[in-house]
Image (cartoon, grey):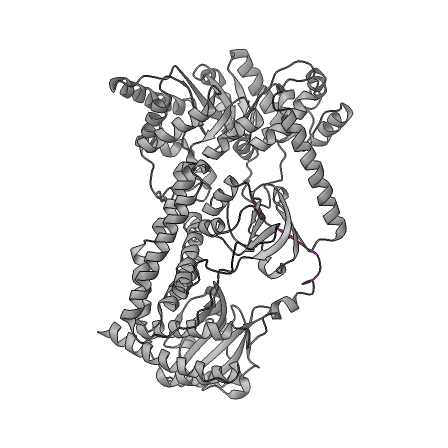
Amino acid sequence: MQAAAGSTVSRRLLGRLRDVMAAGGSAQERLDKVVKLIAADMVAEVCSCYVMRAGEVLELFATEGLLKTAVHETRLRVGEGLVGDIAAHARTLALSDAQSHPNFAYRPETGEEIFHSLIGVPIVRGGRVIGVLVVQNKSSRNYTEEEAETLETVAMVLAELVGAGELIGRDELASVDGNALLPVRLEGTKLTGGVGVGIAVMHEPQIVIERLVAEDPDHEKERLRDAMKAMRRKLDEMFEAQDLAMGGEHRDLLETYRMFAEDAGWMARISEAINSGLTAEAAVQKVHEDTRVRMAQVTDPYLRERLHDLEDIANRLLGHLVGKEGGSASRGDLPENTVLVCRTLGPTELLDYDRSHLRAIVMEEGSPTMHVAILARALDIPMIGRAQDALRRINNNDTVIVDADNAQIFVRPSDDILDAYAASQLIRAQKLAAYAAMRELPAVTRSGESVRLMINAGLLVDVTQLEVTGAAGIGLYRTEMPFMSQPRMPDVANQTVLYSNILDQAGDRPVVFRTLDVGSDKLLPYWHSDPEDNPALGWRSIRITLDRPAVLRHQLRALLRAGSGRDLHVMFPMVAEVAELDRLKSILALEQQHQANQGVAPPSSLKVGAMMEVPALAWQLPALLDRVDFLSIGSNDLAQFLFAVDRGNPRISDRYDVLSPAMLSFLRMMAQAADAKGVPLSVCGEMAGRPLDAMALLGVGLRALSMSGPQIGPVKAMVRSLSLPALETYMAGLYDLPSHSVREELRHFAIDHGVVI
């Protein structure tokens, strides 16, 4: 009964606000009437509205109850006082004794010392706080949850007035930035490699809601149900239209996305907002803004990334409700060379665009594991995420260079920079043509040594790089990608189909399947573990699968079934001691026996390997080499553990160099030990894909390298231009140097000896 009464009060107040908004007059006049109306309806002596100005300053724009002379005079920084605290944390604050709160800031010009209780809510638009709405009473008052919800609903209505550009000009923030129309260089995070040059097109899914208040909740719920049906139908059509050659993982992530559109809790919250007096579209917007603000406080990377999918769905549903199914302006009429600029992007929003016109994508948010980044990688669209202030610093129709390989963006570049990139693009195209021409040529040095160049893969679409590059096989298949792109653990049948498809596409070229390697920065949506102080050193990789052997057994069962009658290579990651490898091999033996009992033919050959990532394992090399058919060095984690450096920490991630005497000595020791035992040794980390680093790897004795497909060409060019004996002789004098790095020495060697790097 109390909730129903709250809804009645909210609908009554919203109805009055609608009349004020429709009455005309300036935005300031309407805002003055609104605060007076709210104060009267909530039986409060004060109602004030603060608006965010440039520089994160909250200015008192309207008040009923405080001194009128304080309007446009009183200002608070974000975080200052109770109003600033509400803005800083984007949360509602209700206090029966506001002046006793440690954040209370007294402003004598307002006359607010006589008011004791306070409730304030953030005014949010587009996920950003653009103001604060405050109600105050002289007496001590415990504000109810229903009153808080009513004020939050009213704040949403005010967001349209405050954010319409009438109280504060839309160009205010841009005008504060003195470089607004000058060339700008931005930095971000590489999500998909490559370089794109084009015209900026702003992705603006924000839909203007013209009707906020409704009289008939039942009618609005019917509109919501109809819009949901229409949206789901359109999603089905979109998914069916996608090229199945993109691979099973992409189909899986689209199915995951569809689950968000069918979330019962989300729909229930929208229905509650409709009961408060909002139209269906206003209710969708309110619930989404509430969710966005809450999720902004969440530290779990997976949950935060799923917010991008939810935002995509909310905008799509709003489009159906207001009659604009595309969610924003037409996406088919794009410039021939388009650079899409956005705060974030959902997977289906990307699919809305004509991909033949997209040259690159710039986002203010994002991470490599978000669904749209996975799709962009499959579509070969350069993408940079976490580009701070991109929406503010880039204007529609600006010329933009997106250098995703180096995670930098040039906005309104000078002619010199444009010419330089045009020249580099031409050189890049010529190099690509030269690499393509080398596709059938063997990876053999000038001195006659053969080198195996293989690709790393994690998606079915990556396997096509075998044909494109002429690689000798897949040196690392990251099996965790299918686990990360699905809402639940893939079962044995699904895994078997996937692994069979990979082997089918690879043909007679070997594929090394790395078992599930999750934890640290690779999270699964259905596994929730306690936060760890040092996740890179914590519960991850085989430490998880040894603790949950059923997961490993199911994966090994699927691999054995897929490899029935074929060559199968299985590799265990992050082995820290031989005892762990023995346990892993015993689990594999159990599955081999299980398959035999089921009458499943075994692989024609089964090779078992381990990854050398934990330095401690190097001091058990004799026992290790007796137990494996091959070894692979994961240079990324090996360097992280060898130098005790967190590669996710930007302050120290580049502090140490893999081309240091310490790292090279370690690698040489590994190569010599493996060669003496006749155990094949390869490198599958980023080091293998950089020509200069790869040259050093050959110098220490490695003869097998695995890298991303596009890196095969540059590394093969290096291999074919190298005389290995000269390099080995030169490097013999580097191992005992006390230097931080010998990168420059190796670079000079390459230049002096005509090695293509």
Please determine whether, in this image, residue 218 is positioned above or below residue 407: below
The N terminus - image quarter = bottom left
Between 651 and 379, the residue placed more toward the observer is 379
Q: Is residue 662 above or below residue 418?
A: above
Q: Dividing the image into 4 quarters, which one contains the C terminus?
A: top right
Q: Is residue 212 above or below residue 393?
A: below
- Which residue appears at 29% of the width and 70% of the height? 219
Q: Position of residue 317 (x, y in %)?
A: 39, 59
Q: Position of residue 233 (x, y in %)?
A: 35, 52
Q: Does the magenta stretch include residue 184?
A: yes
Total numbered labels placed on residues in the image: 0
Q: Which of 173 and 248 is in front in this view?
A: 248
In-front residue for pair 236/66: 236
Question: Residue 429 appears at what percent x and percent y?
Answer: 67, 36
Judge left or right: residue 701 versus residue 587: right
Q: As drawn, which residue projects farthest toward the left?
A: 1
Q: Tell me which residue sits at (35%, 61%) in the image.
A: 227
Asked if residue 126 shows in the view, the reply is yes
Q: Can residue 112 be found in the magenta stretch? A: no
Q: Which of 294 and 348 is in front in this view?
A: 348
Residue 684 at least partly seen: no
For this view, does 485 lie left or right of residue 716?
A: left
Q: In which quarter of the image is residue 4?
A: bottom left
Q: Which residue is drawn at 37% across and 78% down?
A: 14
Compared to residue 145, the image places residue 138 above or below, namely below
**Magenta-drawn segment:** 178-190
Residue 557 occupies which quadrant of the picture?
top left
Q: Where is residue 7 in the image (x, y as percent from the top left)?
A: 29, 74
- Does residue 471 appear to the left or right of 726 in the view shown? left
